[in-house]
Image: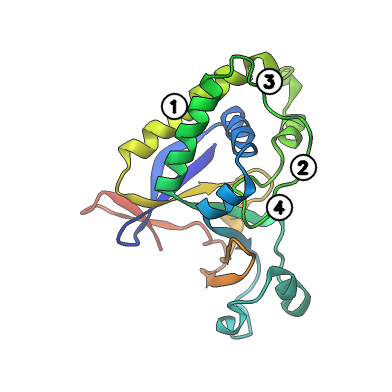
């Protein structure tokens, strides 16, 4: 599953009982790949990357504002597609874009996903790996051959599912779209948050193996990030 979390208007980060399976996420990424770069950049608030390792022995506050490439060269920090944990996007912008996509796909009886591989920007795009690459990773024994004749059907189903979720959760300001494909993020010891231009805005160290810890608050009936 590709899980979805959220951030409320008062800044509380919480898990949501919602997500997408592999086929749904590939289809969703197909839809995202058609969004113009300018529009996508305006929707993405930040990108999160897992940090694996011990507690840093350098002042992390001094790293804020540095570009990812500089952090890799000077501080030996790994910032890669494989370690990309999640994209944080504005809920209202996401909802508006998904509604426009629903109209577009609905009006194109022959809509199909793109097959020309172009890698999306690492910091300003929700998509991490081009969906065509993900399709190539699917087990044929489990999923069979990908039928592009069903692309439109899958797209409409995924769009309606996500739009309904966003309507039902109007208390959320931001949506956190997780990527759990290529990296065991649950083993992480921290996170690095970058803005959509690739500048570090926050470095969080949680401790070994605590990168994805949530605590349940029964009074509020929510799970919140520790």
Q: Are marks 4 and 2 in contact (CB under 8 Å)?
A: no
Distance between the alpha carbons at the discs numbered 2 and 1: 26 Å
Q: In the rendered image, which quarter is residue 134 located in? A: top right
Residue 147 visible from this viewpoint:
no
Q: Are marks 4 and 3 in contact (CB under 8 Å)?
A: no
- Position of the N terminus, as image quadrant, is top right
| Sequence-first tag of 4 and 3 | 4
> How many neighbours does mark 4 have within 10 angstroms: few (below 14), some (14-19), or many (20 or more)?
some
Q: In the rendered image, which quarter is residue 69 located in? A: bottom right
Q: Are marks 3 and 1 in contact (CB under 8 Å)?
A: no
Mark 3 or 1: the one toward you: 1
> Residue 160 — which label?
1
Q: Position of residue 101 (x, y in %)?
A: 52, 31
Mark 2 or 3: the one toward you: 2
Which residue, given by chain and number where applicable, does mark 3 sit on? 143
> Residue 216 — which label?
none
Which residue, given by chain and number where applicable, does mark 4 sit on? 82
């Amino acid at each position: 599953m590709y899980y979805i979390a959220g951030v409320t208007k008062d800044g509380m980060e919480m898990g949501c009982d919602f997500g997408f399976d592999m086929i749904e996420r590939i289809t969703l990424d197909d839809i995202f790949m058609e969004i113009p770069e300018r529009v996508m950049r305006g929707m993405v608030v930040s990108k999160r990357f897992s940090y694996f390792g011990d507690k840093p022995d350098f002042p992390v506050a001094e790293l804020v504002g540095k570009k990812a490439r500089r952090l890799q060269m000077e501080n030996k920090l790994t910032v890669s597609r494989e370690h990309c944990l999640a994209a944080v996007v504005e809920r209202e912008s996401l909802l508006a874009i998904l509604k426009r996509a629903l109209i577009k796909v609905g009006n194109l009886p022959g809509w199909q996903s793109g097959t020309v591989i172009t890698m999306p920007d690492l910091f300003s795009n929700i998509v991490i790996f081009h969906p065509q690459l993900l399709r190539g990773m699917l087990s044929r024994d489990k999923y069979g051959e990908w039928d592009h004749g069903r692309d439109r059907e899958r797209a409409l189903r995924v769009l309606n599912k996500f739009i309904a979720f966003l309507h039902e959760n109007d208390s959320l300001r931001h949506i956190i779209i997780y990527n759990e494909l290529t990296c065991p993020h649950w083993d992480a010891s921290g996170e690095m948050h970058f803005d959509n231009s690739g500048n570090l805005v926050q470095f969080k160290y949680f401790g070994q193996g605590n990168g994805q810890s949530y605590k349940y608050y029964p009074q509020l009936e929510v799970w919140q990030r520790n």
